[in-house]
Every structure is written in structure tokens, then in C-alpha cells.
Amino acid sequence: MRPVDLEDRRDLITCGAAAGVAAAFRAPVGGVLFALEEVASWWRSALLWRTFFTTAVVAVTLRAFIQFCSTGTCGMFGEGGLIMYDVSSANVMYSASDILAVLLLGILGGIFGGLYNYGVDKVVRTYSIINERGASFKVLLVMLVSLLTSCCCFGLPWLVTCTACPSNSTESCSADSESDNYKSFQCGSGYYNDLATLLLNTNDDAIRNLFSSSTTKEFHISSLFIYFLAIYFLGIITYGIAIPSGLFIPVILAGAAYGRLVGRLFESISQLDTGLFSLLGAASLLGGTMRMTVSLCIILLELTNDLLLLPLVMLVLLISKTVADNFNKGVYDLIIIIKGLPYMEAHAESYMKHLVAVDVVSGPLVTFSGFEKVRNILYTLRTTGHNGFPVIDHPPLSDSSVLCGLVLRSHLLVLLKAKVFLTDNINSEGETLAKISALDFAKAGSGKGVKLENLDIDDEEMEMYVDLHPITNASPYTVVETMSLAKAAVLFRQLGLRHMCVVPKSQERPPIVGILTRHDLMPEHILGLLPDLNLHK
């Protein structure tokens, strides 16, 4: 099996994200579009085929397991089929008044989505400070959030009154069975608690209840309002704790609640089913928080099996995203910023057109000679955090100083561990290649690579040399120092680079000016170097 290069690793991550969405929501096409819209930095036809093949395998595997578990031996796994929330039985008829209601849902989704992202941003930053204090604080935070969630789920239903069981319902409504869809809670026989039915059911059943066209008035307006507030704020305070909590399902539940609430308010003048209002509400809040359009639209259609609702779903997603973009960024973008990951946008920022590549190069530049002492390499690796180093040949190895290429920190560690050392700085490329192979440089999994502290090198070996030519990338991507920073940023992102060498325009100067990385192209770094720069210019 050949080593997996960086491009293959990125493709595998993209395919994994597509497979996860396809499996979670049983939406194979939506998974492909999610990877295209949100995951991949640069899309190409080969990656499209790979993600489509991955989600197709997921769909076939899911179908096989659902068929196998149809007898009930797998618990709730086989429930729902490939269409989790089928609303195709609802009558999709809408008029001008319904369009106004949809516009209102889109605006509300944008406002609530912007507020949701603001809350998640503040909460995650606070939780990060708490979690850094140790494992005991993480456990304590999880316990507090769990306690608050339990108090809400079991305390809020006491605020509403009991409702008589619907006579036309196909679902059982008795006080004796805990598996019934309608939860009696504190109510007597023949009655149910509508808020408990939403809070104490599984999330899947709660979504089915809200999307259902057969539960027109089973949930009171006051209960829907309380449920929306509870899920909305619990979703905000739950994200960021030390256990997985997710974003999609809480947002769908909260959006479906206020969507159904709007449907109840407009039922006297609207022809649209309240269950479809609930679906449109979920779409609006998803668009307001995630800021995705195409993939969300297809995921919702695959979830609900109602193609007739496509125009309204498209409209509400576009409106909610447009409104929310006026407040802040999407929730995934905010989380990336919080984690300090150097994510580059698909387009160059406008202020980059007024800068050149050399303007954002930060120093000091650390280079190696083609034949470098072991002591110098170890000292550099210990005192810097750089992952790439230019390799320069100096006279007498060449007529003048020449840039040989770029060597990676991980490759240097492999070479040091193998102790491929020389007593003199003479050409011994054949000897180096005989002691190591390409598989030695294959990137290991997280935490499994060669570590600097594990190297065992004695004083005698410190004075020996290492020939860096065999492990140097002799054709690194380079740009002239006077190149527009906007062009350099676009090139950097589209090629999926980690390092870009900046070379001088004049031949009389040293062969390299500096190295650009993703961090050098971040607005925070540029503003630190150029504090008087107007980033909105």
C-alpha cells in the first residue's frame, strides 16, 4: 500500500464528512453537497466521484442494516426507514398570504440564527477557559449542564395544563404505557401533557410530532413557545462541554417549534399545513446558523420526501442566510476562529490587493545548509516551532548561494532518529537513500510520529553532519516578493499549500526572503504587522 500524501488525506477527510452526514440524516446526495459547500477547500471532479461513491456505499449499507433490523432486534436503529420524517402526505398548497408567512419565517430564522451564533461564540469561549483548568472542571461542567437540562425537561411540563387525548389519533394515549407517543406525565387517564410529549420523547419522535400534518392542534401555542425557548437556550449552553452535543438536531427542534408556532398564528388565513410550517421554520433556523443553502435544501428534502416544498425551502434558506450575514459569521466559521485554526476564505480579502507578498513575511528566517551539523538541526528544532525550513547551498558546493528547496520538520526527525550521519560534509546521497525508504516518511497518525524528546544522540554524533538533499523538496512553490498578496493568497488556497517561498526580485540578494504560511495570511497577523492598515478598505 502506497503512502498517503497530503492531497489524499484531505480527500479522505472530505469523504468522511460526507459519509457522516449521509449516515446521520440518511441523505447521500446531501452529504456530497455538504462536503462541497462546507468542507472542501478546492473541489475537483475526482473528489466529486469519491464522495459520491462513499455516500452511495453508506446508503446501501444503511438500507441493508435497516432491513436486517426491521424485526426490532436492533432497538430503534431500524425505525423510520431511509426517509426519517416523511411529510409527503401533507397537501402542499400555498397562496400569497403563505408567501408572506414564509418571508416572516426567513427573517425570524436570520435573527434567531445570528443570536444563536452569538450565544454559542460566548459560551464556547467561556467553556474553553473552564475546560483548560483540568479534567475535574470538565466533569463538573457536564454535571451542571446535565442537571439544568433535567430540571427543564421534568420541571417545565408542570407549567401547562392537561389536554384530552385526540379522538382521531392513530397513536396510543394512555397513562399506563411509557412507550406511547403522547406522554401523560401528571395527567390522568384519557389526558396527555403536550409539553412533556415534546420534551420527554426522543428527538426523532419530537421532530416527527412537529413535522406531522396529523397533529394540527395537539400542541398549544403556549407550549410551543416554552418548548422553543427551552431548546434554543439549552442548545446554546450545551455546545462546548466535554461530551458530544451536536448542532443540527437542537437547531432543527428549535426551528420546527417556532415554525409550527407561526403556522398556528397564520392558520386562519393560510392554506399551508402547520407541519410544513414547522419544516420551513427548521430550514430557516438552519440557514441562519449554518449559513448553508444548497446542501441544507437537499438534506431537508431527503429527510422529508416532499419535492413540492422545494421553492419555499429555497426561499426561506436564502432569506434567513441573507439576514443572518448582517450580524455575524456562520457557526462553523466562528468555532474555527475560537479554536485558532487558520481557515482561509475562498476569495482574497479586498485589502490584500494593496499589499505585496513581502509585506506580511515575518522573521527571523531560519535556514539550513545542504550539509548541516546535527547540533544545529537539534538546536533549531528545539528553539523554533516552524514546520518547514529552506535549504540553501553555499560555496563551494555551488558558485553562489542557491535555494535547493524546502525540508519539513517531520522529515528531519525521521532522519535524526535513523542516525543517517556523516563525518564530513561530502556528497553521500546514495548512502542516505540506502538507509531510509519512502515509507519512513509517511505521515503517522495523531501522536504517533517521531518526537524530538525521544531522540537519543550523544556528544560525538552532535558534531557530525546530515545530508539534507535527499529529503528536500527541490521544487517548492515560490512567488516573487513583489507579487500581489491577493494573488498569492488565492494561489496558496487553491493549491492546498502549507508553505510558500518568497524569493527576491534581484539576483544579487540572498536566494530567499521568507516563507508564507496560512498564519501569515490571517487578518490578525497582518494587522499585527501593519497596525495602521484598514482591513475594510
Image: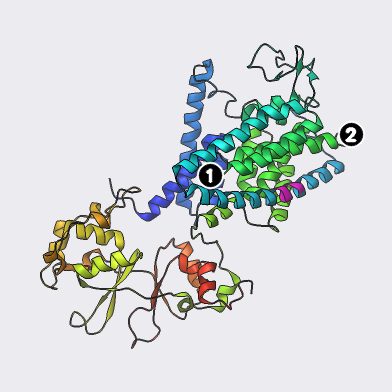
Circle 2 sits on which residue? 268
* Image x and y of residue 107, in percent: 76, 50
* Image x and y of residue 270, in percent: 86, 36
Image position of 20 with respect to 532: above or below: above
- The residue range painted magenta reads 108-112
Task: Specify whether 98 is left or right of 393.
Answer: right
- What is the crowding at mark 2: few (fewer than 14 residues within 10 Å), some, or many (at least 20)? few
Q: Is residue 292 visible?
A: no
What residue sits 75% from the left and 32% below the top? 275
Label 2 SS: loop
Q: CA distance from mark 2 to mark 1?
A: 40 Å
Q: Amino acid at mark 1?
A: Val
Does the stretch in magenta take in 109?
Answer: yes
Task: Specify whether 133 is left or right of 441.
Answer: right
405 or 351: nearer the eye? 351
Residue 32's disc number: 1
Give the image quarter of residue 193.
top right
* Image x and y of residue 116, in percent: 67, 48
Residue 236's disc number: none
How would you classify the magenta stretch by its main secondary structure? helix
